[in-house]
Image: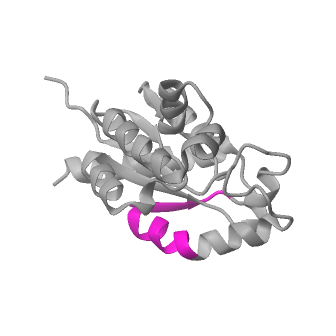
Amino acid sequence: MRQILPTIVVIGFMGAGKTSVGRLVARALGREFVDTDLMIERAAHMTIAELFRREGELSFRRREMAAIDRAISVPGRVIAVGGGAVLSAENRTALKQAGLLVYLRATPETLAGRLTGVTDRPLLNNTADRAGRIRDLLVARGPIYETAGDVAIDTDRRNVEQVAVEVLEWYRRRVGAMAGR
């Protein structure tokens, strides 16, 4: 019987590279990649920005919780979750039980630069100072990301390929250590 390796869950703020890095990691490991934001959009037949506008954040968070439950129902996947997913203690618990969490960390300035021109992020709309808004959100979210993640990987001044290699190296060391117990 083939052992199923732990699921990898990529967490972090919007613009950290969760989807791009997750796809590369999944491809390198021959795993299925799942993005919970895309799952939500497909199920709702609308974008997340539209969902926020039409139904509000609370409705979106309920949909997000259901998407996470579906994503983790198949062991061994690589999963990217939305930036706010780990704010819920229930989501954090479910994700931790499903596998290993990789926090992709970046400074507010880096994140703001990556999100320049992006208009479909409800939490960043209606602000002239994106870096300031991101900084404010990270004050609240940063400690949660840090404690939820099994590892934190800095993404500043690095491309997605470099970050994916670091995730893979960490994961292989971690799985090797787990097998050695």
Q: Quadrant of the C terminus?
A: bottom left
Residue lying at 55% horizontally and 49% vertically, measured from the top left: 56
Q: How many numbered marks appear?
A: 0
Is 70 placed above or below 93 here? above
Q: Position of residue 157 (x, y in %)?
A: 76, 58
Relative to 37, is 108 on the left or the right?
A: right
Q: Position of residue 5 (x, y in %)?
A: 28, 37
Is 100 placed above or below 4 here? below
Of 58 and 120, the residue lying toward us: 58
Residue lying at 45% horizontally and 69% vertically, measured from the top left: 144
| 68 falls in the magenta region | no
Q: Position of residue 47 (x, y in %)?
A: 63, 33
Of 74 and 85, the residue lying toward us: 85
Residue lying at 46% horizontally and 46% vertically, measured from the top left: 59
Is residue 169 at all visible to an observer of this figure?
Answer: no
Classify residue 124 by image quadrant: bottom right
Of 118 and 114, the residue lying toward us: 118
Is 174 placed above or below 20 here? below
